[in-house]
């Protein structure tokens, strides 16, 4: 994973990225990349630096250390986590589609059709439900014809059935457009099954792996049904250390260190590839 | 130039030109909740006037420079996270106004029409003033139209705008400069104490009737023009000060716009008094 070719192919690559703000490191030593057609899912507890990492990848935040390499002329489509429109700003769905780029009516109709909200074209964003808002934002991002689609908790506030439908849609988009997808999951353990790489963050990359094996397990199918298993997967992983409030790290064997030394070969290091 | 010989027509033409610009810019002030910010920049105009006299500068240059300096000072202070933005605005807003008043009173050599600066003296506008209003106004409108998409995108969601290369920081800077230019234009027309009223009231009125940001901006301009015409005729009719009369006219239009919905018992939209 470290040769020159891959680095050139990657849509975006974070290399040992650290972001230091207000007297503390929000993330440190974060390394991952997203290739075309690849789906990368970031998981981790609140405040673990998922959004920070994604914002650095997008260029919204500048890294304090390390570097972010974006492919030249990379077109990004972004679905933000929070979308709170001020009531004073009228914004029908059709206008939102043209937010950052001119679009033809034909393309807009097509995108809205794809995400299944053609009937809401003239509705104001204020009147949309959580799921409808996410679909509208997704349609808007798609209209950018992105090489890289970035979704920050796309299923947040969406019910379980809607979650499966949205994940199906994201998979369809990936298959049809061939874009790379970087998404943040709001759930620590359940990720989209088509995810190629799950990255668990906790201020740094704790572990990474594929979720597919888990999705095929019988227990999981029994729990959620075969249909769900096609779209969702449980990502099981054990953390062998705990981050203490003062920033130090307690390992499973009870020892306390300043760092968890993920970059180095420690016996407890666990990387599923 | 027959029509410009009449002071009332001159006032009307200048006022209409001004209202056309305040419409769309006022929408951004409302959308971005910058009303108090606009007020602070406007109040600093008096300090700008005073310093222009002290340093023998062109009045417009002095006002624009001070307004911009105050807005950048706010940006820097906000980043320090010492006091809330609200408190900072309060400090800068009133201290620039007070400083301006003190400096003006110390200058015995020049006589300044303080009431005119504070509340406007639209009936005294000259043809040169009209040229300035339309010249600067056209520049402001052209910049707004040119940068319209990035300006709206940055208002809707800063991070989205940043990720999709809409440069939201630039948008913020543009809006500040335009606001400073507008304040320089507005001094003669409604005075520095009432500028924000004409930015906000027409935009707030337009909100209820607009389905898109663009319609809201155009509508705010039209409503502003109506307020100027109504206010000026009103001030002629009842012999009231012209600047405040224009603001009162805008207020009356706003109140009328609230009525039909309430009479019909329509669903309760949050009626936001646009402040802060």
Image (tube, coloured by chain):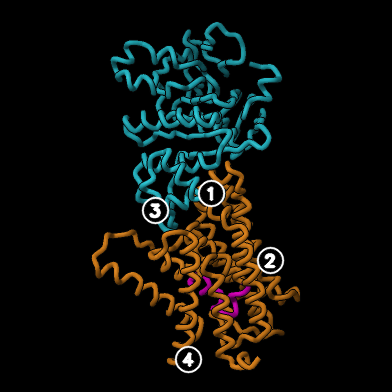
Chain colours: A cyan, B orange
Instruction: Indicate which label's residue lies in the foreground, 1 or 4.
Output: 1
- The residue tagged 2 is B65
Dot 1 and dot 4 residues touching (CB under 8 Å): no
For disc 4, the chain is: B
Q: Are marks 3 and 1 in contact (CB under 8 Å)?
A: no
Q: Disc 4 versus disc 3: distance between alpha carbons?
A: 45 Å
Q: Which residues are magenta?
A: B184-198
Marks 3, 2 in one chain: no
Task: State how far apart marks 3 and 1 are (Cα).
Answer: 16 Å
The secondary element bearing badge 2 is classed as helix
Q: CA distance from mark 1 to mark 2?
A: 39 Å
The secondary element bearing badge 4 is classed as: helix
Q: Residues within 10 Å of mark 2 (few under 14, many from 20)?
A: some
**Chain hosting mark 3:** A
Q: Residue at x 25, y 70 (%)?
A: B263
Q: Is residue A268 rendered to the left or right of residue B139?
A: left
Residue B71 in view (yes/no): no
* Chain for numbered disc 1: A
Mark 1 = which residue?
A: A103
Task: Specify whether residue B191 is painted magenta.
Answer: yes
The front one of B55 and A234 is A234
Judging depth in this view, the residue of A24 and B273 nearest the camera is: B273
Spatial CA distance of label 4 from label 2 is: 35 Å
Sequence-earlier tag: 4 or 2 = 2
Q: What distance separates the C-alpha of mark 1 from that of mark 4? A: 49 Å
Q: Nearer the viewer, mark 1 or mark 2?
A: 1
Using the image, tell me which numbered label, if any, was put on residue A122.
3
Q: Distance from label 3 to label 2 (Cα)?
A: 43 Å
Q: Chain of mark 2?
A: B
Question: Horizontal and vertical percent for residue A62?
Answer: 63, 37
């Amino acid at each position: 994973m470290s040769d020159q070719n891959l680095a050139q192919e990657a849509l975006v690559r974070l290399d040992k990225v650290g972001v230091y703000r207000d007297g503390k490191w929000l993330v440190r030593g974060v390394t991952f990349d997203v290739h075309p057609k690849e789906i990368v899912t970031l998981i981790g507890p609140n405040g673990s630096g998922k959004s920070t990492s994604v914002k650095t990848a997008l260029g919204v935040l500048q890294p304090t250390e390390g570097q972010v390499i974006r492919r030249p002329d990379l077109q990004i489509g972004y679905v933000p986590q929070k979308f709170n429109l001020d009531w004073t700003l009228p914004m029908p769905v059709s206008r939102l589609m043209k937010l950052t780029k001119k679009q033809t009516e034909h393309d807009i109709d097509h995108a809205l059709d794809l995400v299944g909200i053609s009937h809401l074209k003239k509705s104001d964003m204020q009147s949309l439900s959580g799921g409808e808002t996410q679909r509208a934002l997704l349609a808007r991002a798609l209209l950018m014809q992105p090489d890289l689609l970035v979704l920050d908790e796309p299923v947040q506030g969406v019910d379980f059935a809607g979650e499966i439908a949205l994940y199906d849609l994201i998979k369809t988009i990936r298959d049809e457009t061939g874009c790379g997808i970087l998404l943040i999951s709001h759930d620590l353990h359940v990720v989209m099954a088509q995810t190629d790489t799950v990255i668990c963050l906790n201020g740094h990359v704790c572990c990474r792996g594929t979720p597919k094996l888990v999705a095929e397990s019988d227990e999981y199918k029994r729990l959620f049904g075969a249909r769900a298993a096609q779209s969702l997967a449980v990502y099981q992983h054990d953390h062998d250390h705990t981050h203490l409030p003062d920033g130090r790290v307690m390992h499973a064997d009870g020892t306390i260190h300043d760092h968890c030394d993920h970059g180095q070969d420690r016996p407890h290091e666990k990387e599923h590839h | 130039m027959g029509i410009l010989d009449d002071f009332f027509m001159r006032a009307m033409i200048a006022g209409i030109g001004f209202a056309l610009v305040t419409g769309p810019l006022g929408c951004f002030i409302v959308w971005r909740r910058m009303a108090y910010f606009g007020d602070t920049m406007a109040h600093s105009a008096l300090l700008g006037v005073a310093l222009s006299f002290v340093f023998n500068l062109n009045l417009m240059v002095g006002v624009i420079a001070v307004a911009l300096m105050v807005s950048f000072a706010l940006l820097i202070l906000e980043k320090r996270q010492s006091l809330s933005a609200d408190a900072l605005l309060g400090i800068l807003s009133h201290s620039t106004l007070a400083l301006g008043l003190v400096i003006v009173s110390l200058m015995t050599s020049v006589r300044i029409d303080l009431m005119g600066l504070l509340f406007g003296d639209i009936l005294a506008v000259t043809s040169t003033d009209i040229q300035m209003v339309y010249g600067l106004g056209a520049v402001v409108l052209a910049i707004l139209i040119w940068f319209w998409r990035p300006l709206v995108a940055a208002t809707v969601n800063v991070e989205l705008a940043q990720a999709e290369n809409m440069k939201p920081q630039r948008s913020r800077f543009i809006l500040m400069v335009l606001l400073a230019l507008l304040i320089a234009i507005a001094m003669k027309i409604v005075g520095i104490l009432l500028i924000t009223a004409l930015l906000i009231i027409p935009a707030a009125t337009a909100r209820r009737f607009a389905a898109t940001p663009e319609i809201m901006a155009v509508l705010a301009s039209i409503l502003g023009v109506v307020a100027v015409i109504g206010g000026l005729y009103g001030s002629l009719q009842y012999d009231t000060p012209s600047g405040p009369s224009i603001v009162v006219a805008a207020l009356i239009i706003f109140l009328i716009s609230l009525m039909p919905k309430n009479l019909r018992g329509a669903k309760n939209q949050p009626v936001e008094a646009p402040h802060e």
